[in-house]
Image (spheres, rainbow, N blue to C red):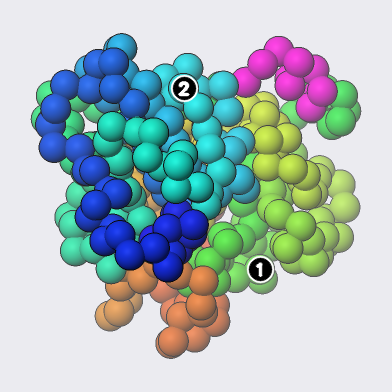
């Protein structure tokens, strides 16, 4: 971890404890604090939400964050973060701070990750009293400019069509949290039949499955293989979002969009507890929840059994229930 965070310190005979100054409840006003977490997107929103509350408690503090450059869009324009730095850092940069928060491993192989909602987990690590923080304050936030809306609306003329819109995150970055492609087809067919336009969100690495799904329903289906910031702004135009346990869960939560979340390795309660108008579908298998969090396929199958056993009809029923006016 030291090599990842401050590589220039490797080879120097300085114990990590000599350069790492963890926060232990001191007054942070007029103090510089650095928080570190490489990614992914949801983890950065967990972290930024905790920082928002820390800033509210210590308004004169200087709160900087060091993350992977891929995730800068998650905290762009956030008013409670003073500076966003890219990992890895130089040792002299590290030494400029009074205190450090180190969040690597807070989800992976951490028993507390099976007990706390993720937003609470990051706040606890920062020494905040989660019982004193109201539930609505624990929801993430995203910040956009007017120019971003103008740009995105110009890129997607379909937004002017008077049809309801649903965004689907086609796949997670982790194969252990990805829903089967053939099952998405039935969900998409139902949404189109109900009068929705469907926007398929994903990265360049997911181009093939996204274009395949779009090719099966050439009308009313729009691939969104765009930079992350563009996809985030486009999500603001959606009437609802459906996603596996991944970034668009938290984008939907931040935008307060109706949301259906699909879960297997982690219980939905640990991710969506504080979101408005959402339904979490939790797989019921002998091995779930396993709390595995990584980039390798499930040892029991790919796609994993938990996601494979969630039938499209379950997602469709959850969505229809969610979108009822009295839901």
* Number of marks in the rendered image: 2
Earlier sequence position, callout 1 versus callout 2: 2
SS of the residue under disc 1: helix
- Does residue 28 appear to the left or right of 69 in the view shown? left
Is residue 64 magenta-colored? no
Q: Is residue 246 above or below residue 209?
A: above
Quadrant (top left, top right, bottom left, bottom right) of the C terminus: top left
Residue at image x 37%, y 40%? Answer: 95
Disc 2 marks which residue? 82
Real-space CA distance between mark 1 and mark 2, rounded to the nearest whole angstrom:
41 Å
- Does residue 308 appear to the left or right of 80 in the view shown? right
Residue 12 appears in view: yes
Dot 2: within a 10 Å radius of its alpha carbon, few (fewer than 14), some, or many (20 or more) residues?
some
Over which residues does the magenta segment extend? 144-153
- Does residue 221 appear to the left or right of 263 in the view shown? right
Q: Main secondary structure of the magenta part?
A: helix
Disc 1 marks which residue? 181
Q: Is residue 27 above or below residue 173?
A: above
Question: Which residue is nearer to you in this view: 229 or 103?
Answer: 103
SS of the residue under disc 2: loop
């Amino acid at each position: 971890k030291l090599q990842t965070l401050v590589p220039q310190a490797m080879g120097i005979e300085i114990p990590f404890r000599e350069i790492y100054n963890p926060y232990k409840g001191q007054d942070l006003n007029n103090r510089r604090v650095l928080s570190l977490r490489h990614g992914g997107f949801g983890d950065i929103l967990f972290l930024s939400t905790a920082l928002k509350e820390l800033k509210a408690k210590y308004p004169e503090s200087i709160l900087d964050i060091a993350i992977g450059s891929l995730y800068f869009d998650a905290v762009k324009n956030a008013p409670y973060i003073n500076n966003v730095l890219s990992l890895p850092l130089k040792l002299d940069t590290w030494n400029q701070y009074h205190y450090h928060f180190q969040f690597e491993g807070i989800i992976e192989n951490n028993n507390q990750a099976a007990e706390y909602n993720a937003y609470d987990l990051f706040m606890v690590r920062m020494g905040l009293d989660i019982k004193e923080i109201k539930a609505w304050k624990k929801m993430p936030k995203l910040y956009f400019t007017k120019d971003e809306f103008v740009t995105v609306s110009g890129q997607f003329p379909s937004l002017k069509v008077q049809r309801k819109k649903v965004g689907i995150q086609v796949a997670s970055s982790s194969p252990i949290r990805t829903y089967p492609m053939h099952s998405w087809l039935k969900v998409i067919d139902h949404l189109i039949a109900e009068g929705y336009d469907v926007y398929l969100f994903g990265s360049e690495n997911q181009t093939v499955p996204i274009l395949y799904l779009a090719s099966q329903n050439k009308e009313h289906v729009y691939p969104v293989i765009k930079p992350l910031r563009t996809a985030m702004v486009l999500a603001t135009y959606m009437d609802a979002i459906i996603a596996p346990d991944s970034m668009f869960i938290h984008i939907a939560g931040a935008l307060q969009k109706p949301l259906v979340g699909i879960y297997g390795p982690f219980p939905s309660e640990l991710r969506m507890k504080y979101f408005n108008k959402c339904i979490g579908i939790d797989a019921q298998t002998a091995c779930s929840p396993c709390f595995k969090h990584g980039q390798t396929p499930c040892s029991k199958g790919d796609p994993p059994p938990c996601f494979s056993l969630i039938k499209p009809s379950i997602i469709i029923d959850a969505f229809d229930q969610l979108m009822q006016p009295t839901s």
